[in-house]
Image (spheres, grey):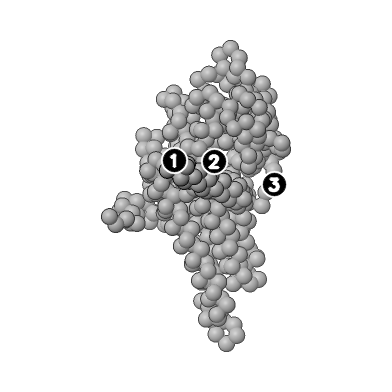
Amino acid sequence: MAISLSYDPAVEDVVSKTRDFVRDHVMPIEDEFAGDITAAGGDKRRLKLRDQARDAGVLAPHAPVEYGGLGLNMSDRAPVFEAAGYSVFGPIALHIGAPDEGNVHMLAHIAGADQKEKYLAPLARGDVRSAFAMTEPAPGAGADPAALRTAATKVDGGWKINGDKWFITGADGAGFFIIMARTAGSPGDRGGATMFLAPADTPGITVGRHINTIDRAMIGGHCEVAFRDVFVPDEDVLGEVDEGYRYAQVRLGPARMTHVMRWMGSANRAQDVALDYVARREAFGGKLGDLGMIQQMVADNEIDLAAARALLVKACYALDQGQHAGDETSIAKTFAAEAFSRVVDRAIQMCGGQGVSDELPLARLQRELRPFQIYDGPSEVHRWALAKRAVGKAKKAAAATAANGTAS
């Protein structure tokens, strides 16, 4: 049976509307403020863009229909998120940026009915932002989530949480936190984590300094957050106690792919900027685009973009089929994160001095794309996980072969 790679006309319509909206309403703001969302007005700007996106019919394409979204599955999100990602402010405008997009996805799948009304409904509408508080200062949880040290202790009617987090995206101005805390075992144990929901004004939650990073388009910064005797009632436990790591997988795989979707748009923009430049720039007796070395960079960019898109499509298909898709999402995330950096680096090289200046958007696209090789799992961790699973399968196959030989 043939596999269709086309999209429903309704999805194509959303893609077209998103492209128009980003071109007409979002890119001028990004260009005016050089991709710095704080300089552009932070949450005030976000709310204005949100209202414009709602009027354009493109707000929250991932959110459930009953909460005001378009209810698109992973595969259908891909071209829409890509169109939004053509501007680094596009995901903010459509309310599909990290961490809110991943939190909407997780709450839609895990939260109870009351939790959905209290937390998911306002988040899906874009009335509030959220933060996912898992990463900790060393020796706590980072690329290795099992190192989790923030602890939740059972008390009458709920839990008290104590610990320190950092690099918590969107923390400044978030309406609520999803907190990962240890409820069993010790740091280093693979299980024993639980997720908790807590309004940002809960006593004991303190958002500290912004950690200065090279990217500028993540609203709410990447912050230190302290939790001191934070009381969370039992009804705000997200999912089952001690099952936090398992539930986190509901979020992590899809969130990695939506990162790929968004930054695919940025990489496409870098290629488009470079193509426009080399097609017009006169040098060495002709157009730059007629030179063999330039053509090789153009071709390598086309290959990287096509390969990343193909891996993304495969991973989204697996997720939509209800598969865990650990290999598919790790492969797509690792390849795309590195490929997109190659694309924008070649684009800068093709555009020469303008490429590293504010005359073109390439320098700011590079600073947004580079952290993707670290965010949502460093490339090295994904490679280690892929290799571990592959070698594990090979060992099982070898053991089975040896057992069959012995039995015969």
Element assignment for label 3: loop
Rendered location of residue 94, percent (x, y): 46, 46
Q: Amino acid at mark 2?
A: Pro
Rendered location of residue 142, percent (x, y): 65, 40
Q: Label 1 to label 3, Cα distance in Å?
A: 62 Å
Q: Are marks 3 and 2 in contact (CB under 8 Å)?
A: no
| For marks 1 and 2 on the same chain, the one whose residue lies earlier in the sequence | 2
Closer to viewer: mark 1 or mark 3? 1
**Is 84 positioned to the left or the right of 44 in the image?**
left
Residue at the spot 49% in from the left edge and 66% down from the top edge: 303
Q: Residues within 10 Å of mark 2 (few under 14, many from 20)?
A: many
Q: Are marks 1 and 3 in contact (CB under 8 Å)?
A: no
> As drawn, which residue projects farthest toward the bottom?
285
Q: Which residue is mark 1?
A: 407
Rendered location of residue 134, percent (x, y): 61, 35
Residue at the spot 62% in from the left edge and 50% down from the top edge: 380
| For marks 3 and 2 on the same chain, the one whose residue lies earlier in the sequence | 2
Q: Which residue is mark 2?
A: 99
Q: In the image shown, does 48 or 378 lie closer to the viewer? A: 378
Q: Which residue is mark 3?
A: 212
Q: Amino acid at mark 3?
A: Asn
Q: Is residue 368 visible?
A: no
Element assignment for label 1: helix
> As drawn, which residue projects farthest toward the left?
1
Q: Label 3 to label 2, Cα distance in Å?
A: 18 Å
Q: Residues within 10 Å of mark 1 (few under 14, many from 20)?
A: few
**Is 87 positioned to the left or the right of 182 in the image?**
left
Toward which corner of the image does residue 165 lie, by quadrant? top right
Element assignment for label 2: loop
